[in-house]
Image: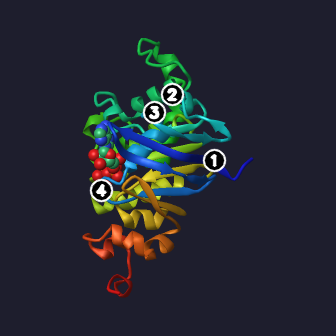
Amino acid sequence: MSDTILETQGLTKEFRGFLAVQGVNLTIRRGTIHGLIGPNGAGKTTCFNLLTKFLIPTRGKITYDGRDITNMKPAEVARLGLVRSFQISAVFPHLTVLENVRVALQRARGSSFDFWRSDSVLKQFDGRARELLADVGLTEYAELQAGSLPYGRKRALEIATTLALEPTMMLLDEPTAGMTHEDVDRIVTLIKRVSKGRTVLLVEHNLKVVEGLCDNITVLARGEVLAEGDYMAVSRNPDVQAAYLGTDPASVGVPESAAHG
Ligand SMILES: Nc1ncnc2c1ncn2[C@@H]1O[C@H](COP(=O)(O)OP(=O)(O)OP(=O)(O)O)[C@@H](O)[C@H]1O
């Protein structure tokens, strides 16, 4: 088994002549948590959507687990174990938390949205659904309507529904966006826990989160790779510091002395 699970070569996305992502070469090592960061408009979301197959690249190649997935559809790559976290909008607000995970398990088994199935058939998924809820710390919320969950708990539910697909590699888009400090800490712990035995790629704005979670980081700026390495290496890189200029140096974790010359 190769050490590299996901690789891109010359990944490029052009929107009507504008290069949102250009010539990006990514190498993501199996079993690591990899962060994709960069200032606003750097191309992170576009890159994420290319990797999850929600956008088709203009040029370049994406290889996952030794296979060329450049022209595959999201559902096809999900079957290969490369799974994007569901968006909150994919949580069914009127179903309970448990039912939401059950639906995700049904989808994973290919039984799709057969809501008309008998209760006894559905209940066979309950054991696994409760295990997943325990994994993400939602046991006590199992019978609540998903719509009434606090925001941070909804994101945890989103992770549980992603785990239902038994991903080998999870792609998380800003898992801590809009969260309170407490929720951020909880989600960081949760991501660490569920990353065991998996590979995780996350796009993240909160650099403290990146520092605490990521083994490797790719910094994008203006659609290109600006720097790569562990947190210490990229936060000390002068190009990265310059790209983040105008933001508080402390927010990139740049030591005061380095930030001021
Ligand atoms: N569908 C689109 N059509 C045209 N331009 C786009 C499209 N999607 C993104 N862009 C442009 O591509 C560039 C990169 O955008 P992208 O959203 O990928 O950056 P980002 O790093 O995720 O930014 P942010 O941190 O602000 O979310 C931006 O200049 C954006 O305006």
Q: Is residue 66 left or right of residue 108?
A: right
In the rendered image, the quadrant that contains the C terminus is bottom left
| Residue indicated by mark 3 | 56
Q: Can you tell which quarter of the image residue 37 is in? A: bottom left
The mark nearer the N terminus, 1 or 2, is: 1
User: Residue 22, percent across and down?
Assistant: 44, 49
Is mark 3 in CB contact (under 8 Å) with mark 4? no
Q: Which residue: 34% across, 40% down?
A: 17
The mark nearer the N terminus, 3 or 4, is: 4
| Residue indicated by mark 2 | 73
Helix, strand or loop for disc 2: loop
For disc 4, the neighbor class at 10 Å (few under 14, some 14 to 19, many from 20) is: few
| Residue indicated by mark 1 | 5
Inspect the image, locate mark 4, and give the three-letter code of the amino acid beneath it. Answer: Asn
Q: Which residue: 27% across, 35% down?
A: 147
Q: Relative to 32, does residue 207 appear above or below in the rendering?
A: below
Rounded to the nearest angstrom, the CA distance separating label 3 from label 4 is: 22 Å
Q: Which residue: 49% across, 49% down?
A: 23
- Name the mark nearer the viewer: 2 or 3: 3
Is mark 1 in CB contact (under 8 Å) with mark 3? no
Count of residue discs:
4
Rounded to the nearest angstrom, the CA distance separating label 1 from label 2 is: 18 Å
Asked if ligand 1 lies within 8 A of label 4, the reply is yes
Is mark 1 in CB contact (under 8 Å) with mark 2? no
Rounded to the nearest angstrom, the CA distance separating label 2 from label 4 is: 28 Å
Q: Is residue 116 left or right of residue 182?
A: right
User: Residue 71, percent across and down?
Assistant: 54, 30
